[in-house]
Image: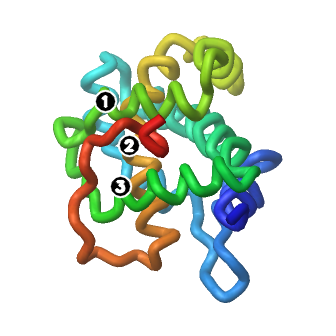
Amino acid sequence: SCAIAQRIAAKSAAAPQWLEKEDSMASVNINDLLNEIPLSDIAAQFGIDEATAKQAVTQALPGLLGGMAVNASNEEGATQLASALKKHEGAKFKGLDAVDTEDGKKIVKHVLGDKEQDVALALGSQGEGGLGDIIQKLLPVLAPIVMAFLAKQFSGGSENTQAASSGGGIGDL
């Protein structure tokens, strides 16, 4: 159903600071997602300081979340996203070594399509700007982490599911 898209889009499109679940469930603060992201590892991998890494991640997340919401706004897209989220249930990322960036590239390609570079540059121009190149490289790192986070949120936070396989990205498209 389109309920997943509505939950993601509820705040991520206009003010990407919250992911909302249905009224009966608690709202999730974007800071919860940020806490899942190994900022010091990202800083080291990209040769930037932690503050810049946090800024880049904070600017990149709305693009991923917004793209997922748009893709899931119709029945087919919502079904594909739900299927992809199931594949990421139980995935844990203690560091970047555990992140499957090939899967991330597939997710980003599906979410943003041929607009990946344009979106990265637009996201990178926010705030102090100049982060477009970093954000474009960062998106495939963040995508599997975001998917695992959303899978945990939408499955009720169950920790006893199998670790995610590195399938073909969103819905294996």
Q: Is residue 80 visible?
A: yes
The image shows residue 4, relative to residue 117, as above or below, that is below
What amino acid is found at the position of numbered circle 2 in the picture? Pro
Quarter of the image that includes the N terminus: bottom right
**Marking on residue 144:** 2
Q: Nearer the viewer, mark 3 or mark 2?
A: 3
Residue under the image location 47 percent in, 45 percent down: 171
Residue under the image location 47 percent in, 42 percent down: 170
Q: What element carries label 3?
A: loop
Position of 79 with respect to 149 (left or right) is right
Q: Which residue lies furthest to the right in this view?
A: 14
What amino acid is found at the position of numbered circle 1 in the picture? Thr
Identify the residue under disc 3: 88
Position of 147 with respect to 92 (left or right) is right
Q: Is mark 1 on a helix, strand or loop?
A: helix
Identify the residue under disc 1: 101
CA distance for labels 1 and 2: 8 Å
Label 1: how many Cα within 10 Å (few below 14, some 14–19, many 20+): many
The image shows residue 157, relative to residue 95, as above or below, that is below
Residue under the image location 71 percent in, 55 percent down: 75
Q: Earlier in the sequence, mark 3 or mark 2?
A: 3
CA distance for labels 3 and 1: 14 Å
Whether the residues at callouts 3 and 2 have beta carbons within 8 Å, the answer is: yes
Q: Where is residue 4 in the image (x, y as percent from the top left)?
A: 65, 62
What amino acid is found at the position of numbered circle 3 in the picture? His
Q: Quadrant of residue 103?
A: top left
The image shows residue 71, relative to residue 128, as above or below, that is below
- In depth, the one of 54 and 89 nearer the eye is 89
